Image (cartoon, grey):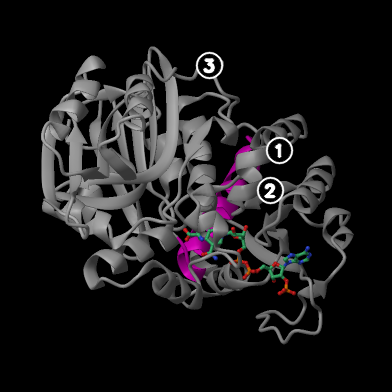
Amino acid sequence: MKETISVGLLGLGTVGSGVIEILEDHKESIQHKTGCNVNIKTVLVNNLSKPRNLQNNETKLTDQYTDITQDPEIDVVVEVMGGIDHTLKILMEAIENGKHIVTANKDLVAQYGAELLEATQRNKCDLFYEASVAGGIPILRAILDGLSSDRIRKMMGIVNGTTNYILTKMSKEGVDFDTVLKEAQDLGFAEADPTADVDGLDAARKMTILSILGFSMPINLEDVQIKGIRGLSLSDINYAKQLGYSVKLIGVADHSENGASISVEPTLLPLDHPLSSVNDEYNAVYVYGDAVGETMFYGPGAGKFPTATAVVSDLIAVIKSLRLGTSGMAYVQPQFPKKMKTKNDTITKKYLRLHVHDQPGMLMELTKIFAQYDISFDQIIQRKADAEDERELMMITHQVSEADFERAYEELGKLSSIRSVDSVFRVEGSE
Ligand code: NDP
Ligand code: HSE
């Protein structure tokens, strides 16, 4: 076993610079835990002329990835540069050259995790990606190790810091969506192009990774139903509060005998649900296992040091498995074939906000449609709308299948008394 492990670092931005600082600050304890020194031999960047603060003068800066992938002295490649296709090509080349991989790249892992896993196992290399889901929260290890004795039935996550920050500010300070999105970008939580945050894709990628590991099934990003928070209004947040709920962007992954269902969408949660008190850019993942019952993991989902902590922990895991001679054996292939629930088997409560024509019998017409599909209501609020002849209705149903709800919703559109259906959200945590 070597005394010094050589690392090639791909990327020296927010996370990459955090990795270098943590490796330097925690040098002795890492040496104690692994029995090795870690040397960042080469760092790949885009722009060589940017000023950098490298701790070790011997670290080489390059803009040629082959300086890392083809260097026989480099044992581990730590990828913190982002990107999908080009990055996959670099990592595949590194793996074929026998290098172990640590990555924080959820976009890549959600899309090409299976290919990366196959290549690393074939080459007896390790692949770790703890930082890709919920930054500093060690949720993947909790699922794969801490809860490995259990059967996970459900996971619900606030796994995107940007949208949680936006919803918290809208709810607590009444700030409108666009103003608070700009704030999240300035604070560095949001992606450079915040579309993936706001439209739910970033959270969907993280839920894909969680579901593959939690349910041991080859889930794809395409299996996730995705709806982001764009267009969510302050009115919905305020009405939800009146009904006793918060509004959060929640990833729900559910697994039963009928299969799995995975979604990311704005969701109403009871105000006393533990996920309701997860605010600002914080993340949390609620995990329900048959034997353990309810558990929840909470912490910073993004940022330089929380993310770099997860990356360096993965690096320590690689070194430990090198010492034990178990490289490439850490994550096994999914155990079960993929089976997704149909819409008939996907059962949730729903929140609706509608504008209706204020006429006698209107409510009866409406509830009659729902009754046809066996949908009853848990709560209904009616208030005056801006127009004199209109009323605004906020309703929460009891449990209903997606299939029945879709049919009822289609028929609602045909009712002349309905002026507009303004919002439809999922409701969780109160059944
Ligand atoms: P940054 O944009 O801050 O840094 C990216 C780094 O990679 C820069 O040093 C950049 O070079 C380099 N880079 C980018 N593309 C290339 C390329 N094609 N060739 C060579 N170098 C390149 O990103 P972050 O540090 O924020 O994120 C890194 C990864 O970690 C991403 O996958 C992200 O999704 C993930 N992540 C980030 C979190 C966070 O809080 N920031 C949280 C969890 C995961 P240069 O410096 O020259 O521009
Ligand atoms: N943009 C991401 C977020 C960064 O807001 O959660 C961490 O993955």
Residue identifier under label 3: 336
Residue drawn at the location 11% of the way across and 45% of the way down = 381
**Would residue 155 be seen by someone viewing this image from the given angle?**
yes
- Nearest to the observer: residue 348 or residue 27: 348
Tag 3: amino acid = Phe
Q: Nearer the viewer, mark 1 or mark 2?
A: 1
Is residue 195 located in the magenta-colored stretch of the structure?
A: no
Q: Residue at x 19, y 19 (%)?
A: 371
Q: Which residues are magenta?
A: 302-326
Helix, strand or loop at label 1? It is helix
Q: Position of residue 265 (x, y in %)?
A: 40, 43
Image depth: mark 3 or mark 2 in front: 3
- Position of residue 232 in the picture relative to residue 201 (left or right): left
Q: Residues within 10 Å of mark 3 (few under 14, many from 20)?
A: few
Q: Earlier in the sequence, mark 1 or mark 2?
A: 2
- Judging by the rendered image, the residue that carries numbered circle 2 is 101
For the C terminus, give its image quadrant: top left
Where residue 96 appears, x then y in whole percent?
A: 83, 41
What kind of residue is marked 2? Ile
